[in-house]
Image (cartoon, rainbow, N blue to C red):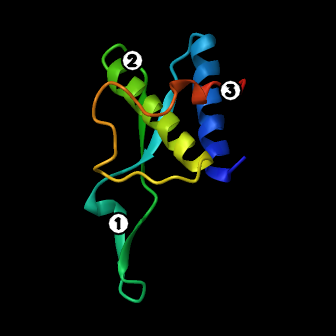
Amino acid sequence: MNKVANRIKQTATLVRSKIQRRSKPTLSFPLRSLSNVKYHPKKGFLELKGKKKIRTLTVATVKTFAQTLRMMSQAKSLVEDDEIMTKRTCPRTGTMHASTNNLNPTQ
């Protein structure tokens, strides 16, 4: 399995096990702000510094948390199939091109 797909699967497994133990799962994301980027003139692009934002599943965040898990599933499918997605082909409706079962740790 691809390194990225394996990392997504590990994260999904951790989220699922925390939910089954009745504890709140968390996801860590890079902080999306200018304070978390550094420009490299020789390379010619911005790089993330490494600051993270932790998101916890709560009653108030259940919808966005579920959307994040669905996008992880989509990303895993794309990586495994060696496909790309553009902003024009990205699904914007409630239906996804890939199965959301891709996050099932038993697969």
Q: Position of residue 66 (x, y in %)?
A: 41, 24
Of discs 2 and 3, which sits in the foreground?
3
Residue beneath disc 3:
105
Point out the tag, 1 or 2, that comes first from the N-terminus: 1
Of discs 3 and 1, which sits in the foreground?
3
Residue, x 58% and y 53% (percent of image)? Answer: 82
Separation of residues labelled 2 and 3 (CA atoms): 22 Å
Q: Tag 2, which secondary structure?
A: loop
Q: Hey, which quadrant is residue 59 in on the image?
A: top left
Q: Position of residue 15 (x, y in %)?
A: 57, 25
Q: Position of residue 54 (x, y in %)?
A: 43, 37
Q: Tag 3, which secondary structure?
A: loop
Residue, x 57% and y 24% (percent of image)? Answer: 101
Point out the tag, 2 or 3, that comes first from the N-terminus: 2
Q: Which mark is residue 58?
A: 2
Task: Name above or below for residue 57 compared with residue 28.
Answer: above
Q: Is residue 39 left or right of residue 27?
A: left
Q: Position of residue 1 (x, y in %)?
A: 72, 46
Residue, x 65% and y 28% (percent of image)? Answer: 13
- Badge 1 vs badge 2, beta-carbon distance below 8 Å: no
Task: Report the amino acid beneath label 3.
Answer: Pro
Task: Report the amino acid beneath label 1.
Answer: Val
Q: Quadrant of the C terminus?
A: top right
Q: Which mark is residue 37?
A: 1
Separation of residues labelled 1 and 2 (CA atoms): 29 Å
Question: 94 or 19, which is in the foreground?
Answer: 94
Q: How many marks?
A: 3
Q: Tag 1, which secondary structure?
A: strand
Residue, x 44% and y 45% (percent of image)? Answer: 29
Label 1 neighbour load within 10 Å: few <14, some 14-19, many 20+: some
Label 3 neighbour load within 10 Å: few <14, some 14-19, many 20+: some
